Amino acid sequence: MTESATEPARAPVGDALGRALSAEHAAVYAYGVIGGKMSGALLRRATAGFDAHRARRDQLRTLIAQRGGTPAEPGTAYRLPFAVRRPADAVRLAVLVEQRVTTAYLELAADRDPALRRIAALAAQECATRAYGWQPKIGPFPGMDRAGADFDVAVPTPGAGTPAPDSSGLDGSAGTSGSEEAQPEPSSPDGQ
């Protein structure tokens, strides 16, 4: 089949599956770091994220093997995008991990195989839900750099007001100390 102007070139399924697997390997590693900075309810949330990414990783390994491929092994270590010293840093990392894994699944969701599209769509939805759970606001679309976004819509939380953008101290301003759990704070009524 030749490429046409209406149909963009796509990587083979194995490549998209492999990239999704690599993203899951990195997520499992990152959630180990994230959990190390958490306690209480946030630690339970981090553990649930860790378990979910391990399950997806194992599912992808099986899919690759069933299709005759050899699943890549995880790296021995991964370079984190910033230092994770306190719970607010761990929350920031969790949001970033979920956004990046969502992006990996978006490529797989474009595959022609309906079974792969379904798996990818469900996995992307789970990642987006976890990202929102860590930092309840709607920002740029998955895969879009936050700095390049022209908008940042805060969504009201029933009974709690509207979370302010980066109010959890994730931008390096106010925030929590090492012993406090990172929580979004309400903002003014107009969401600014």
Image (cartoon, rainbow, N blue to C red):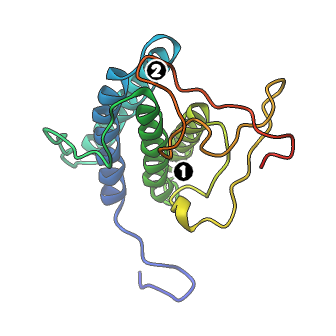
> Marks 1/2: CA distance?
27 Å
The answer to whether residue 154 is seen in the rendering is: yes
The answer to whether residue 144 is seen in the rendering is: no
Q: Could you say where residue 85 lies in the image, as x and y percent from the top left? A: 33, 32
Question: For mark 1, what is the residue?
Answer: 114
Give me the disc on residue 66.
Answer: none
Viewer-proximal residue among 68 and 180: 180
Give me the disc on residue 48.
Answer: 2
Pointer 1 and pointer 2: residues touching (CB < 8 Å)? no
Viewer-proximal residue among 129 and 107: 129
Q: Nearer the viewer, mark 1 or mark 2?
A: 2
- Name which of mark 1 and mark 2 comes first in the sequence: 2
Q: Could you say where residue 3 lies in the image, as x and y percent from the top left? A: 44, 85
User: What amino acid type should be assigned to the residue bearing mark 1?
Assistant: Pro
Q: Quadrant of residue 46?
A: top left
Residue sticking out furthest to the left: 76
Local crowd size for mark 2, using a 10 Å CA cut-off: few (<14), some (14–19), many (≥20):
some
Residue sticking out furthest to the front: 174
- Decide if residue 36 is on the left or right side of residue 187: left
SS of the residue under disc 2: helix
- Up the image or down, 182 lies above or below 146; here it is above
Q: Could you say where residue 150 lies in the image, as x and y percent from the top left? A: 66, 67
SS of the residue under disc 1: helix
Q: Could you tell me which residue is drawn at 52 percent across and 54 percent down?
A: 109
Q: Quadrant of residue 178?
A: top left
